[in-house]
Amino acid sequence: MDGPTSSRRQRIGARISRGWDLLRHQGPGQIQFWFIALAIGVAAGFAALLFRIAIERLQTAVYGTDDPNLLASFAETLPWYWVVAIPVTGGLVVGAILHLFTPEGRLRSVADVIEGAALNDGRVEKKAGIASALCSWITLSTGGSTGREGPVVHIAAMISSWVSNLLKVDGITGRDLLGCAVAAAVSASFNAPIAGALFALEVVLRHFALHAFAPIVVASAAGTVINRLAFGDVTEFRLPGTTVIEFYLELPAFLILGLVSGIVAVITMRAIFVSDDLGTRLQRRLGLPHLLRPAVAGLLLGLAAIFYPHIIGVGYETTSRALTGQLLFHEAVIFTVLKVAALAVTMAGRMGGGVFSPSLMIGALTGLAFGILATGLFPDQSGTATLYALAGMGAVAAAVLGAPISTTLIVFELTGDWQTGLAVMVSVSLSTAVASRLIDRSFFLTQLERRNVHLAAGPQAYLLAMFRVAGVMRKPTDLSAAEEDACLEMIGQGLYVAPSATLETALPLFDRSGAACLPVAVPSDTPEERPILQGALFHLDALKAYNRALAATAAEEHS
């Protein structure tokens, strides 16, 4: 009995081992992977749901309002000192968390998820990510003028990273699991299953490979079901009725709105970056501790909210009023400027949150102001101003996110109005075309570019940064190693690279020197001594590694 039983166990063990190997390396093509995608979708959907509920509960407790969606109106009834004290207190708590749990005091968000997908096999940081989620929760609950989609996307990415590390999957599978988590989180946040799936593909993975599509759709559907079980099958914004467009006569107006929206989106993004740089310079000049920076931003927000409480929080109430035409022209213009300023202050203060919801509000206000002008000038040849608000909402958000496809669909799913597709698409196409010429494709990719992570230019640019010289060089003990005397002579001339350097640094040296190989050396303990030779990097080896990476990336994107 022992013989047959032992043989059966060995066969079962071999099958499990083969199945595990398939899951790790060919997961997207396997049925088992879809069940894992479904589980990740459920987990990410619940995480997004709980994050949203947590914000509403804390916001209700702090401000004392019965309906968090009407926070701006309720804040008008509060004493001025309370309106100021709440964001300052929130900033102090956020600063303390960042000081304790993030070494550089920087919050993690969508840009870090994109970087993880491109450069870290679909993994993101966990400790700093948890701290960032806490900070964003506090910020959004205490008057911070940002959105919840950025933290939610990073929370979902942490879930998929944990699963990827548990299963020890490779880069392709890890990225697909990341896409599943992001799709489910976006779908659960906005009740937008189509847009959630496309957001993961278009913004995070930045390709539309067929092998990733099915599991991401499964996860996105799971996230949507969780949202609808909690909130019902309702849209985030309710429009007053069916909008009407005079297709041929109004299209030029929507083209102009697209151009205006693109410019507004660029101003918004540059305001954030300029404010961040200005805040950093002032902090250094004044000697302000890192943990007080969010509190200062909270003070500025509180002072502004005394007179304009519309800048508090995510801003869905004001966005809804813009989409239903309940604002006057001068109100729409003033609220647009104030929201841009409040968003810039919140982001520059390192308080946490995302840019998607604020860009929806800014876009709706921009579109409404433009629509009031357009319908006022040509009342007989135009529809309603609210239609322009809807198109502007999509146009600004698409330019900020660099995601025209998923943003267009998000606008439809948020409003439930599928009759105005042509107007929204025209405006979105022009706005993204304008913005992409003036920034590095999107807000997130520009953030990464400012950190010297060059993803906007494509794989041909960022893949070089993935290879360390130490992993490609030939050691002195190799049979085909470089001659030691020649290497030492080049080191004496200062022509060498460090083992920790990347091919992004090394390849330009080959072009400048014309050498077939470069010495790899580390500085000695004393300046008088020559750097210590570790090996040599051959130009041919570097190009082979780069070519293999390009081929693997192309194969993944077209599989």
Image (cartoon, rainbow, N blue to C red):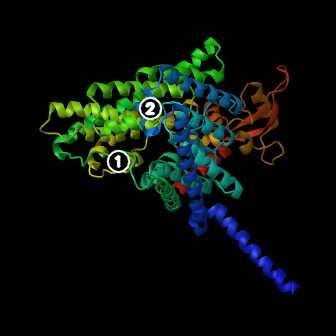
| Mark 2 residue element | loop
**Which disc is residue 415 wearing?**
1
Residue for point 55% across, 22% down: 85
Q: Position of residue 123 (x, y in %)?
A: 64, 47
Whether residue 439 is visible here, answered yes or no, is yes
Q: Position of residue 516 (x, y in %)?
A: 68, 39
Q: Is residue 124 above or below residue 28?
A: above
Q: Is residue 276 above or below residue 68?
A: above
Q: Amino acid at mark 1?
A: Thr
* Left or right: residue 456 compared with residue 267: right
- Pick the front one: 218 or 507: 218
Q: Amino acid at mark 2?
A: Ile
Residue for point 31% across, 41% down: 390
Graded by Cα atoms within 10 Å as few (under 14), some (14 to 19) or many (20 or more), the crowding at tag 1 reads some
**Which disc is residue 439 wearing?**
2
- Counting every numbered tag in the picture gives 2
Tell me which corner region of the image, top left, top right, bottom left or bottom right, holds residue 374: top left
Q: Position of residue 4 (x, y in %)?
A: 83, 85
**Which disc is residue 357 wearing?**
none
